[in-house]
């Protein structure tokens, strides 16, 4: 498909004051399906924008309509991150899918990156909306461990600036008491952190009618996945989900401050929906 046949359609959805931004990158003809992208958390979202846009264009060239969501309180959406919650983000996903299906009643595939991948699984597990397939890019597999990693960024930043130290336990106490805390340039609230921490793979049955494609970064071809990743995959399989694992090599873009490409990830992902 030629680039002129790919359309880019930005729009805001949601109620006034709670609007969130979406960008649809799609083929000009009737698409084969809707792909709805759920982004990672914090600075990981910005670091991966170019890579995600590249993949979305590839999906569009293959005949799909790919809609990228900026959750409420993030990116170009209204609101502040400290007012966001997983409940609101799940509502963003629901409203997006319902609007897309009203316009074109097509199958829906969720595509998530890092925390967005975990949120995709959680949405598929709890929503009454039928999901036809799920693409996971380097998914977070434990909400508790992920929140601890985020809080450690503040601990490290305080130490680097010779400021009064805090432990992750102390930061959790502040958040639980209703305080807002600045972490790596983002001010977060306790509700969102608590909800992320509560995310669990337990009882995630019948997530979609098709396949769950799990794409995991390895340092070299043939390297084994980590124990935590293998355990998470087995948990999903044990409750009846069809999970296919696709290792890929390349830089961990979500951790880099400069833009980079991951051709192996793009190539593998693009081949899955041909």
Image: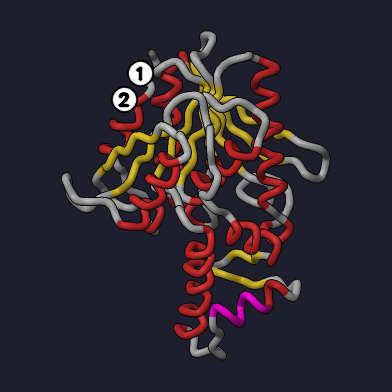
- Whether residue 170 is in magenta: the answer is yes
Q: Secondary structure at mark 1?
A: loop
Q: Residue at 27% of width from left, 42% of height from top?
A: 247
Residue 130, given in percent of the width and then of the height, sits at 60, 25
Which secondary structure type mostly characterizes the magenta part of the structure? helix
Q: Residue at 49% of width from left, 40% of height from top?
A: 112
Q: Which residue is mark 2?
A: 271
Residue 220, given in percent of the width and then of the height, sits at 18, 50
Say above or below: 123 vs 185: above
Instruction: Examine the rendering and report whether any part of residue 7 can be seen.
Output: no
Q: Residue at 68% of width from left, 34% of height from top?
A: 94
Q: Looking at the picture, tell me which residue is in the foreground, 143 or 12.
A: 143
Say above or below: 269 vs 90: above
> Split into 4 quadrants, where in the image is the N terminus?
top left
- Whether residue 265 is in magenta: the answer is no
Q: Residue at 54% of width from left, 88% of height from top?
A: 165
Q: Which residue is mark 1?
A: 274
Q: Quadrant of residue 136?
A: top left
**3D distance between C-alphas at marks 1 and 2:** 5 Å
The magenta segment is 168-173
Q: Which residue of the protein is positioned furthest toward the right in this rendering?
A: 16
Q: Which mark is residue 54?
A: none
Q: Looking at the picture, tell me which residue is in the foreground, 164 or 243.
A: 243
Contact flag, marks 1 and 2 (Cβ < 8 Å): yes
């Amino acid at each position: 498909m030629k680039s002129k046949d790919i359309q880019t359609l930005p729009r805001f959805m949601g109620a006034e004051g709670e609007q969130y931004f979406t960008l649809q990158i799609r083929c000009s003809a009737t698409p084969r399906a809707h792909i709805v992208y759920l982004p990672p958390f914090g600075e990981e979202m910005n670091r991966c924008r170019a890579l995600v846009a590249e993949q979305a264009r590839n999906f569009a060239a293959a005949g799909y309509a790919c809609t990228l969501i900026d959750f409420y309180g993030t990116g170009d959406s209204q609101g502040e991150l400290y007012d966001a919650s997983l409940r609101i983000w799940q509502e963003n996903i629901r409203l997006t899918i319902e609007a897309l299906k009203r316009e074109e009643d097509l199958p829906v595939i969720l595509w998530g990156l890092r925390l967005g991948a975990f949120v995709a699984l959680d949405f598929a597990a709890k929503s009454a909306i039928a999901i036809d397939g799920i693409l996971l890019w380097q998914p977070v597999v434990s909400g508790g461990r992920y929140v601890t990693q985020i809080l450690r960024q503040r601990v490290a930043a305080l130490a680097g600036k010779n400021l009064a130290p805090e432990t992750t336990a102390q930061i959790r106490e502040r958040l639980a008491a209703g305080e807002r805390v600045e972490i790596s340039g983002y001010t977060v609230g306790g509700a969102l952190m608590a909800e992320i921490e509560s995310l669990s793979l337990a009882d995630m049955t019948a997530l979609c009618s098709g396949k769950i494609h799990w794409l995991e970064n390895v340092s070299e071809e043939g390297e084994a996945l980590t124990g935590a990743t293998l355990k998470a995959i087995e948990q999903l399989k044990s409750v009846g989900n069809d999970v296919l694992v696709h290792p890929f090599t390349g830089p961990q873009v979500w951790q880099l401050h400069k833009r980079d490409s991951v051709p192996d990830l793009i190539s593998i992902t693009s081949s899955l929906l041909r």
